[in-house]
Amino acid sequence: LASSHEGYESFMHKEILESHLAVRETLRSMMRETEIVSKAIKSLSEARRIFVVGAGTSYHAGLMFALRLQKAGLTSIPVIASEHHYFRATEDDAVLVISQSGETMDSLIASKHYRANGARILSLTNTLGNSISHESDIALHTRAGPEVGVAATKTFTSQVAALLFLSSNLLGEDVEYLKEAEQTVTNSLQAMGYALEIGTQLCKKSNAYYLGRGLGVPMALEGALKIKEIAYIHAEAYPAGESKHGPIALVEKGFPVVFINLGEFVGELSNNIKEMSARGAETIVLSINNRLSDNKELKVWREVSVSVSDTRLAPLAMAPLIQAIAYYAAKCKGVNPDRPRNLAKTVTVQ
Ligand code: G6P
């Protein structure tokens, strides 16, 4: 499996297209492994604070999880693994370390640091028998299967699914809605024609902004990271409301701004779109369900909308889309998406 991409254009392409299966298998195992999953939920629910640690793409999945908990009134602290020194835990805290490989040095060192603080350590990794799960009291797994492309794709989407499951359990929500998780990802994969069009457009640009609000922020961060990593396009992500406090200064005719619309704060987001298009920005909107561009007052270059049966599924609808946009931008540039320069699949140095 690992040595060939079996008729697909690249591993990245193949792995994006496998995302629905990765999500299905991850949720199946979460629901099947009731003993360890209940232990994990109990441990997180008893904690005074929940630290969520990760690097790169795994940090973005963790940020989404932490924000969901914070909004519901739990104290959850997202920590970039290499910055763990400035976030001290105590014995009453639980720490969830998220890592696809389970071998990222920054995340491993952070686990050891928090273990030394006396906190309970939980991990969410995609391989078995890795160093981070070895360091943890409770080891959970995503079941995305092997990922060869350097940039995380299906493993990120699986992390998001696992973290929706865990957060819903922690918040006492019914997890019925997750039955539609696989279908949501499939709906997103069916929008690949739009991703091709948007990626091909971004390929002509040297800069872009990704803006969102609420859970759209981690998705914007991930969208910007992906297009930097794979297509070498300079992209920055901001909470959309922050964009008027500085970033908007760079916007002129044709500057691309990708808005992530997860169905929250739609009025505010629409105002941000107006502000950007008034400066000549080329606005792209990635939405769930309702299209913002139905409002004819908004000048939108292109909008894609993925249908979801429950707004909590929105991050799962966005993930394949932002990945595919980066993929098609790389393809348009003629660069190999599986082997981005200067990057490694697993970083085992600090
Ligand atoms: C590297 C990879 C990224 C990944 C990060 C964290 O930088 O290039 O794609 O997100 O490591 O990896 P992990 O295995 O800990 O999730």
Image: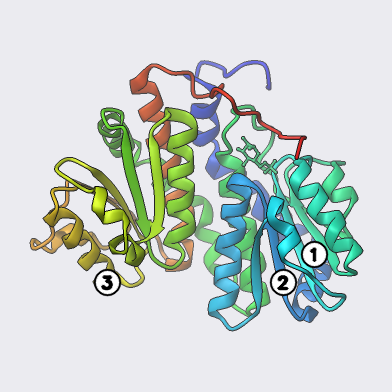
Residue at image coords 71%, 64%: 86
Q: Considering only order in the chain, which callout, 1 or 2, is on the residue closer to the N terminus?
A: 1
Q: Which residue is mark 3?
A: 268
Q: Nearer the viewer, residue 88 or 17?
A: 88
CB contact under 8 Å: marks 2 and 1:
no
Q: Which residue is mark 2?
A: 50
Residue 210, given in percent of the width and then of the height, sits at 36, 50
Q: Considering only order in the chain, which callout, 2 or 3, is on the residue closer to the N terminus?
A: 2
| Dot label at residue 34 | 1
Quadrant in which the N terminus appears: top right
Residue at image coords 59%, 25%: 342
Q: Residues within 10 Å of mark 2 (few under 14, many from 20)?
A: many
Q: CA distance from mark 3 to mark 1?
A: 41 Å
- Amino acid tagged 3: Glu
Residue at image coords 52%, 67%: 177
CB contact under 8 Å: marks 3 and 2:
no
Q: Is residue 312 above or below residue 330?
A: below
Q: Give the left or right position of residue 82, taking residue 223 as reference.
A: right
Q: Nearer the viewer, residue 236 or 12?
A: 236
Does any portion of residue 310 appear in the rendered image? no
Q: Nearer the viewer, residue 126 or 179?
A: 126
- Amino acid tagged 2: Ile
Residue 203, given in percent of the width and then of the height, sits at 31, 29
